[in-house]
Image: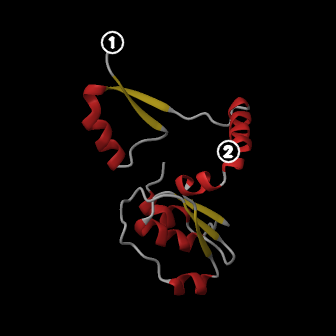
Amino acid sequence: MVDSTRLADVLGEEKFDVVIDPVGGQIRTQSLALMPPGGRLIAAGNASGDWDHTINDTQLWLGSVTIAGFNAGAFLPTHPDLMQPALHAARTAIAAGLGDTAVETLPLSHAAHAHQRMEDRDVAGRLALAAQA
């Protein structure tokens, strides 16, 4: 697992044509350096909670990169005809084994610890809390 604040250090000179960023904030700005000219960044969330963060449009121009936003909550109600094919594609991918995600289950009494791990970005996959039977 790589801490997203250290991406540039860990990846070195590796570049990505497409970056999907669900984090936002400073990570979104740092992601611009991970793309070659012609790269595209898809802003797909704001997990950072940094609603005041902005990107200098000169960075886009100098790097010859683009940013597009995608918000499923705004997009899907205006494109209901895309739901059925999307669900079919998702079912097909899962049936092919492409949707395996590690899930770690913790007792509900460990909720504070689970939240701390998420804040520390110490989670690979998903965490689930379960009430003890």
Residue type at the position of mark 2: Met
Q: Residue at x 64, y 69 (%)?
A: 40
For label 1, the SS is loop
Q: Nearer the viewer, residue 41 or 91?
A: 91
Q: Percent from the top left, x then y, of residue 11?
A: 55, 63
Residue type at the position of mark 1: Ala
Q: Residue at x 48, y 31 (%)?
A: 103
Answer above or below: position of 126 versus 42: above
Answer above or below: position of 88 versus 65: above
Q: Nearer the viewer, residue 128 or 91?
A: 91
Of the two numbered discs 2 and 1 in the rendering, the one whose residue sits closer to the viewer = 2
For residue 133, which numbered disc appears in the image?
Answer: 1
Q: Residue at x 33, y 49 (%)?
A: 120
In this picture, residue 79 sits left or right of residue 3: right
Q: Nearer the viewer, residue 77 or 28?
A: 77
Q: Residue at x 59, y 87 (%)?
A: 62
What residue is shown with label 2? Answer: 83
Q: Nearer the viewer, residue 81 or 125?
A: 81
Q: Percent from the top left, x then y, of residue 111?
A: 28, 33
**Quadrant housing the C terminus:** top left
- Specify the quadrant of the image occupied by residue 18: bottom right
- Count up the numbered dots: 2
- Between the residue at mark 2 and the residue at mark 1, the CA separation in whole angstroms equals 37 Å
Q: Percent from the top left, x then y, of residue 6?
A: 44, 62
Q: Percent from the top left, x then y, of residue 73?
A: 53, 52
For label 2, the SS is helix
Other residues around mark 2 within 10 Å, as few (<14) / some (14–19) / many (≥20):
few
User: Which comes before the other along the chain, label 2 or label 1?
Assistant: 2
For residue 38, which numbered disc appears in the image?
Answer: none
Look at the image and name its color scheme. Answer: secondary structure
Other residues around mark 1 within 10 Å, as few (<14) / some (14–19) / many (≥20):
few
